[in-house]
Image (cartoon, coloured by chain):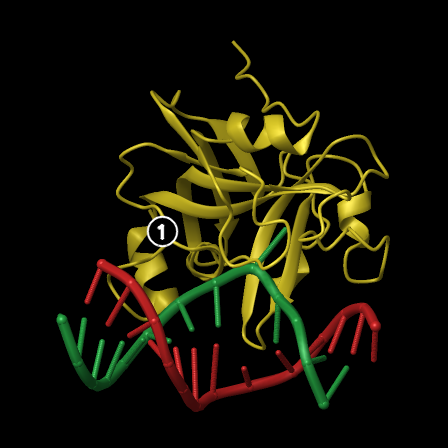
Chain colours: A yellow, B red, C green
Amino acid sequence: MVKPAPNLTDALSAARSLLGYKLIHKTAEGITSGIIVETEAYTSEDKASHSYNGRTTRNEVMFGPAGRAYVYFTYGMHYCFNIVTGPEGSGQAVLIRALEPIDGLEIMMTRRGRDNNLTNGPAKLVQAMGITKNDNGKSLLDGGNLRLEQCILPTEIVKTTRIGIKKDIHRLWRFYIKDSPNISHI
DNA sequence: CAGATGATGTTCT
DNA sequence: GAACATCATCTGC
């Protein structure tokens, strides 16, 4: 039995489909993993998206094939992690905003320097999972150290507005698993 | 709980 | 020079 791959045909479908998948990262420090519980979709027609104004050195991974990691630096000190979706060249991705920690809690606590709020935010989960700018462009589907695995089927998904943006705020492109204790914001 | 604020540096205009 | 897909910490409810 092969576990089903996530539906990455477009950012909106993928943002829902990825909920319940486990993100797994193997590093020298050990294995960390967590179930994706909150996502946001971004496309090239969306003014809030990095891809809105076309391809640049920063966002070029967004225009590559689906299933790769798009890791970007922001606010002078944080990284965020996305999964590229859609046809190659379309500039779509899904921002992973929160995880439910599963494996490697001790490692996460060391990386975060605290014992709470390990993965309930886009920059927090990047730090806890040990994801770096070097992971930008890596495939999540090729059996490498950073990968996805189906874990649970969400019972109920909430669809609402995205967080931390000032443009196109009307779009209901944020999704999270209802009643998850690890959401970045209600 | 909500709101304000500083940290910090890359990217784009 | 401004904007930025954030976070930790503070204040005042």
Up-down: is A77 above or below C11? Answer: above
Query: In what element is the residue under mark 1?
Result: loop
Frontmost residue, A169 versus A155 = A169
Image location (x, y in percent) of residue A105: 30, 52
Q: Which residue is drawn at 65% across and 33% down?
A: A11
Image location (x, y in percent) of residue A77: 54, 75
| Horizontal arrangement in the rendering, residue A56 relative to residue A78 (left or right) | right
Residue most toward the top? A1
The part of the image, by quadrant, that contains residue A92 is top right
Q: Which residue is drawn at 49% across and 43% down?
A: A161
Q: Which residue is drawn at 83% across and 55% down?
A: A53
Q: Residue at x 77, y 50 (%)?
A: A61
Image location (x, y in percent) of residue A104: 34, 49
Frontmost residue, C10 versus A148 = C10
Up-down: is A64 above or below B9? Answer: above
| Horizontal arrangement in the rendering, residue C9 relative to residue A148 (left or right) | left
Q: What's under tag 1, amino acid-wise?
A: His
Q: Provide the residue designation for mark 1.
A: A185
Image location (x, y in percent) of residue A160: 46, 38
Q: Judge the density around disc 1: few (<14), some (14-19), many (≥20) Cα neighbours within 10 Å.
A: few
